[in-house]
Amino acid sequence: MLQINHIRENKEEVLQRLALKNFKNPELIDEVIQVDEDRRAAQQEQDELLAEANLLAKEIGELYKQGKAQEANALKEKNGIIKEKSKLAADRLSEAKQKLQEKLVEIPNLPHPSVPPGRSAADNLNVHQEGDMPKLTQDAVPHWDLISRYDLVDFELGNKVSGAGFPFYKGKGARLQRALINFFLDEAIAAGYQEVQPPLLVNEASAYGTGQLPDKEAQMYTIGLDNLYLIPTAEVPVTNIFRDVILQENQLPVKTVAYSNCFRREAGSWGKHVRGLNRLHQFDKVEIVQVAHPAVSYDVLDQMKSHVTNLLRKLELPFRVLKLCGGDMSFTSALTYDFEVYSAAQQMWLEVSSVSNFESFQANRMKLRFKDKNGQTQLAHTLNGSALALPRIVAALLENNQTTDGIRIPKALQSYTGFDVIRL
């Protein structure tokens, strides 16, 4: 959530930067400023009435001490009228605060000045690409045929037990999943992240704190009876560890990593790009989260990018890094880099990670703050990244490493899988 003072004092800059995100409701900025003026007027009125009531109370006390009960009672009547006015002002203030909050949460985060303009993924900027494209034999097949041939994943069984998009991983397919999870966790721990195992359900306050509510409510599974939500990513519970927390400056950055199942209702349309493991309702992901000092948060973002880069290098996958244009960014992000791996049999790029800096947007919603060396309280910056999401990594690994003798396992994973080739 943007800070109202920044909006009020930098209206034109806010509008210009929001235009990068193709923000379609610029009049909302004027509405927010007007509601804030109403809030401040109600606050001033209430403060003045309370001050006057306090002065009268002292005067009434003195008059009683002096035995001037008649004059004191007259002032008590006047003070009662002032208190009634104060109550009305307090009601107006409470209403204005609520209205201001409701309007502020409709405004997306401001994109960083380096965000390129654009309306869709087609306008994203390719900032880095590396790795050799696999050369497959003519009889190479996409991963959905490979997992059937080698009996690694069972979609029909998942459909029977739960529904489409909830697969069973079997045998070496399950072992590969576990190997990737442990590999990603170990790499993050070696990089200084503390591992946590978060709950898979969060309450409304947590979903609101990281920006899933009210923007992405339709994408989450809801446990209606208990008003809980299945997490779309470990970002939600992990970042909310710090909701309503005041850290000390010397505690920053706080680095946390978590593995979790992730649940997303919106599975997309039919077609090649959503077949097999390309898009699921339930999938596994390792998430890295940092709480950082505002002065260095973009250095932290670069470090997180480097971490994901090293993971993909060790997995021997060709990949590229895209800086998202304004039109393809999330509601909450200030700057996002997407990582995509090349899937040789499908001949397409598959997104496997997003690494983002949210600046103070989430922190303001969660009241996540820190005390600087001068004892002043400031909002922290939050960042997160997928390190990594498993389904499309598995798809690319299977496709890119298929040979006539089986599916080769990258060297970095072999100590985790316990085998170097998946054979029939």
Image (tube, grey):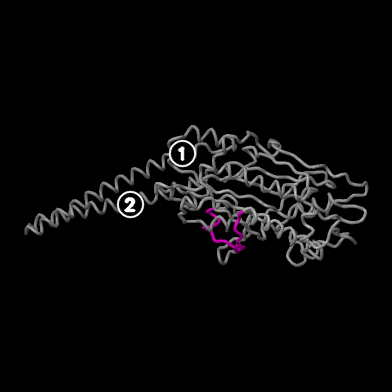
Q: Is residue 207 magenta?
A: yes
Tell me where residue 177 appears, x and y as whole percent. Answer: 75, 60
Q: Is 349 or 122 nearer to us in this picture?
A: 349
Which label is found at residue 90?
2
Disc 1 crowd rating (10 Å Cα; few below 14, some 14-19, many 20+) is some
Q: In this view, does 80 lie to the left or right of 152?
A: left
Which label is found at residue 274?
none
Specify the quadrant of the image occupied by residue 145: bottom right
Residue linked to disc 1? 7
Q: Is 298 or 411 nearer to us in this picture?
A: 411
Give the residues drawn in magenta, as a range: 192-209
| Residue type of the residue flagged with mark 2 | Ala
Q: Is residue 90 magenta?
A: no
Tell me where residue 91 appears, x and y as whole percent. Answer: 35, 52
Residue 224 vertical placement versus 276 (above, below): below
Q: Is disc 2 placed on a helix, strand or loop? A: helix
Specify the quadrant of the image occupied by residue 34: top left
Of mark 1 and mark 2, the one earlier in the sequence is 1
Between marks 1 and 2 in the image, the one whose residue lies nearer the viewer: 1
Q: Quadrant of the C terminus?
A: bottom right
| Residue type of the residue flagged with mark 1 | Ile
Residue 395 vertical placement versus 296 (above, below): below
Q: Do the residues labelled 1 and 2 touch (CB within 8 Å)?
A: no
